[in-house]
Image (cartoon, grey):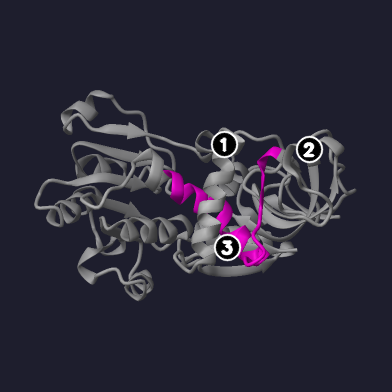
Amino acid sequence: MRAIQAIKPGPAPRSLRLTDMPDPQPGPGQLLVRPAAIGVNYIDVYRRNGTYTMPFPHIPGSEGAGEVIAAADDATEISGFTVGSRVAWARSVSGSYADAVVVNAAQAVPVPDDLDLPTAAAVTLQGMTADYLVRSTFPVKPDHTVALYAAAGGVGLLAGQMIRRIGAHLIAVVGSAPKVELLLDDGVPQVDIVVLGTMRNVTTELAEAIRQRTDGLGAHAVFDSIGRDTFAASLESVRRRGMLVLFGGSSGPVPAFDPQELNAHGSIFLTRPTLADYTATRQELLERAARVFGEVSRGELKVRIAHSFPLAEAAAAHTALESRTTMGKVLLIP
């Protein structure tokens, strides 16, 4: 099979290499899947550049969708999947940037017949992430105001739609002016869009922009996927007893801070959630995936695929994602 390997920590062009390798074999409880499309996510960048500890070399990639080409006997008992089943996954065993991927049967989900595989690959990880953020980490209600960063990114576009469908007030924060048009097309009012790229001092101006839109009170919840560059502003942007949800760090990790700051900002809550903890049981995994896939199939959730790269161009896909200019999902196509 062809696979992308991360050879050493570092920039994508120096780290990622296309290699020929033997096909992996599924072990007990596992499936071997031929992916039709592979999702590219920021966690792949963190693992490639050394932010998250990983062995090198390794095959990057958590997410994908495709057809089962081999299954251990007990894998079928666990999941009901057999050769030919259409499945998607947000966690793989062998790494998803490849022509053949080993997936634990308990972590694979069925793709409905009315959903194409590239769309399933585009929405599995980010769609379930948006689902747990909005419905579980901070259960958004119609009377809430929510500030969402990277609102034109993969998770942001999905979470923003969910927040607005609930009836809550969305403050959509984007990095640059070109992303504003995308949100306007989605029906987000211009007054509720905040552009970071126009700010000289993000810490003061971002918090001021959010408080101006909340009568000075701050947001009930701030969903921050940027991290280091926005964390101080996020603390200033949450209203008393509200919640700061740090679910990424595209600008880098947040520096150490004194928990007394949570007290000083109004007894606010801080959490750093992960998808694994919100799909900890197979039942919860299946429920989240089915809800997201159903919303997409019914047209209630619009999925935007920003770029599709050939597998061999994984480095270009990472570079595009790290530029923070992409608007929607980035895929690799084997």
Disc 1 residue type (three-letter): Tyr
Q: Which residues are magenta?
A: 106-132
Query: Which numbered disc flags the more N-terminal residue, 3 or 2?
Result: 2
Q: Is residue 317 visible?
A: no
Secondary element type, mark 3: strand
- Locate the N terminus by quadrant: bottom right
Give the CA separation, mark 3 to mark 2.
33 Å
The image quadrant that residue 246 belongs to is: top left
Of residues 192 and 207, the one nearer the viewer is: 192
Q: Which residue is mark 1?
A: 52
On screen, 64 above or below 260? Answer: below
Q: Which residue is mark 3?
A: 330
Residue 197 screen position, x and y as percent: 31, 63
Which residue occupies the extreme left position in the image? 215
Query: Which numbered disc flags the more N-terminal residue, 1 or 2?
Result: 1
Q: Residue at x 29, y 68 (%)?
A: 188
Q: Residue at x 64, y 60 (%)?
A: 112
Disc 2 residue type (three-letter): Glu
Nearest to viewer (mark 1 / mark 2): 2
Secondary element type, mark 2: helix
